[in-house]
Amino acid sequence: GVVTLYTNDTKYVQDELYNRYVLRWVRKLHKSKWLIIGDLDEFMYAPHHTRISDALELPVINGCDSIQVPWLHYGTSGLDVSTPSIVQGNRMRVDYNKHIMTNSKAITRAKRIYSLRTHKHLLKKTDSIVNRIECGKILTTHSAQNHPNRSTYTNLDGRLVPAMIPQLELRVNHYPLQSRQFFFNVKAKRGDAGNAGKDNMRNADYFLKYDRNEYYDDELAKRRSARTINALNGKKIK
């Protein structure tokens, strides 16, 4: 793969920078079929497939311009100090039998994007929006053709039923805390990406609210371990 690094220290303009650098790049080259805006603490993958691209070839995705993929929110797993691998070290997440609300990240057809946002993008005026989070089931379908703001406005409604999780074709493991040391020494100090008024919101109360270690889920950890073993044994990784 190829990594292009852009450096810009301007604060509170995350969406603006996405559009200045990423969207311009996508439009210029026009070789990308799909675009994911992902943070370093977010890991999107296809549980039932080798690659994300395999899931995107499924018939259920046909005609879908933007997919809202639900977060599975992980706590610190009781770690005071982060391990070398977030995925291997943090295996405890929210139990969605107790807390059914979640957020999501979009994976969107590049040629359909009008403007980039952090979680869900604005699509071109004539495009349809279909948000799917459960295998084979359309949860929301709307048309943005007559919507004046060209907005998706039909993002995931936030409800994640536990029975959905094994059926998800795509999921995002989200590790916002990682460890107590990382949260208080790094994340709590660097402020917010888009709003100066939220600079101090990541405090002790925030940590306690989001450090939920209620359900053991090592789905991604097992997959990454298997890939590492195959690599060490000289097997080709697809």
Image (cartoon, grey):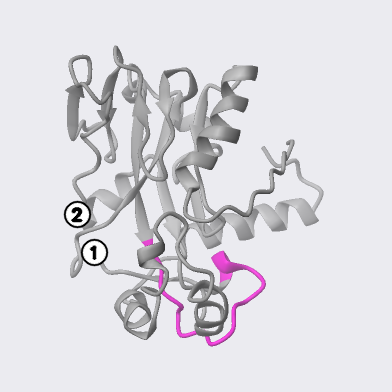
Q: Earlier in the sequence, mark 1 or mark 2?
A: 1
Seen at 35% across and 24% down, the residue is 123
Please tell me which residue lies in front, 137 or 173. Answer: 173
Q: In the rendering, which numbered label is found on residue 132?
A: none
Q: Position of residue 85 (x, y in %)?
A: 63, 68
Disc 2: which residue: 161
Residue 22 visible in the picture: yes
Magenta stretch, overall SS: loop
**144 vs 31, nearest the viewer:** 144
Count of marks, rendered view? 2
* Res. 136 image quadrant: top left
Q: Few, some or many C-alpha atoms within 10 Å of disc 2 (few <14, some 14-19, many ≥20)? A: some
Q: What are the residue bounds of the magenta stretch?
A: 73-88
Which amino acid type is marked by label 2? Val
Q: Disc 1, disc 2: CB below 8 Å?
A: yes
Residue 114 against residue 163 in the figure, above or below: above
Image quadrant containing the C terminus: top right
Mark 1 crowdedness (10 Å alpha carbons): few <14, some 14-19, many ≥20:
some
Seen in the picture, residue 52 relative to 146 is either above or below; the reply is below
Mark 1 lies on a secondary structure that is loop
**Label 1 belongs to which residue?**
96
